[in-house]
């Protein structure tokens, strides 16, 4: 199994186990089951290289309607959350430069994700913690359609925070670490 295959499989396991398994995003299961989520690993080692990859993914999404959403995983760049958080401004700038603001949205996930006003070990941070840094490129029209058809959609983040706090950081950290164990190749 190549490194990129393993990285993508780890993120896929995280989506299966955490995002879908804990129902953090009630819309993810359908897209995952219909194979409309693209998992792609960037080999970028610089912010500029990652911006090139983001642009390529937006171009692909524009050309291929069969891809609902992309998880662009970038394990070699923006490893610290501070760098990652600062980079999000550049990614949003690229979206505007490509005149795709309002067409797509970028959601952010990182192993050390931390919401403003929280402590690093607060359980609620796990709603956006992933095994590797990743950018989720979403079609805004699809997101709007799903939110409009979902009763109490505005309650999802509140419910997720309550669930994370109930589970606690230790359990959530263990669940995140299990995503790595599940996909490790067996020794021969």
Image (cartoon, rainbow, N blue to C red):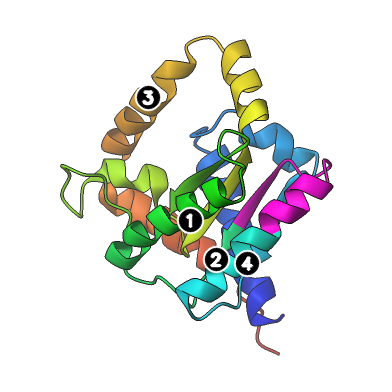
Tell me the element at label 4: helix
Residue under pointer 4: 53
Label 1 neighbour load within 10 Å: few <14, some 14-19, many 20+ = some
Q: Which percent across, then down, holds residue 160? A: 38, 31
> On the image, which quarter does residue 138 sit in?
top right
Tell me the element at label 1: helix
Are discs 4 and 3 less than 8 Å apart at CB? no
Residue under pointer 3: 159
Residue under pointer 1: 91
Label 2 neighbour load within 10 Å: few <14, some 14-19, many 20+ = some
Q: Which percent across, then down, holds residue 180? A: 52, 67
Are discs 2 and 3 less than 8 Å apart at CB? no
Residue 62 in view, yes or no: yes
Q: Which residues are magenta?
A: 57-71
The residues tagged by marks 1 and 3 sit, at their Cα atoms, a distance apart of 28 Å
Q: Give the residue at x 64% y 60%.
A: 55
Are discs 4 and 2 less than 8 Å apart at CB? yes
Nearest the eye: 149 or 18 = 149
Q: Which percent across, then down, holds residue 92? A: 47, 49
Label 3 neighbour load within 10 Å: few <14, some 14-19, many 20+ = few
């Amino acid at each position: 199994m190549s490194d990129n295959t393993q990285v993508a499989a780890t993120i896929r396991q995280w989506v299966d186990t955490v995002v879908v398994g804990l129902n953090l995003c009630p819309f993810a299961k359908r897209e995952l089951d219909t194979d409309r989520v693209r998992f792609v690993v960037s080999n970028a080692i610089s912010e500029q290289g990652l911006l090139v990859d983001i642009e390529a993914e937006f171009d692909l999404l524009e050309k291929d309607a069969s891809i609902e959403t992309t998880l662009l995983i970038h394990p070699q760049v923006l490893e610290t959350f501070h760098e990652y958080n600062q980079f999000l401004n550049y990614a949003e700038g690229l979206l505007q430069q490509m005149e795709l603001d309002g067409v797509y949205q970028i959601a952010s996930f990182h192993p050390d994700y931390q919401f403003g006003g929280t402590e690093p070990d607060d359980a609620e941070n796990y709603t956006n913690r992933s095994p590797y840094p990743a950018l989720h490129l979403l079609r805004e029209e699809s997101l709007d359609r799903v939110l409009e058809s979902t009763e109490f959609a505005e309650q999802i983040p509140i419910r997720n925070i309550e669930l994370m706090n109930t589970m606690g950081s230790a359990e959530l950290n263990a669940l995140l670490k299990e995503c790595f164990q599940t996909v490790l190749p067996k020794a021969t």
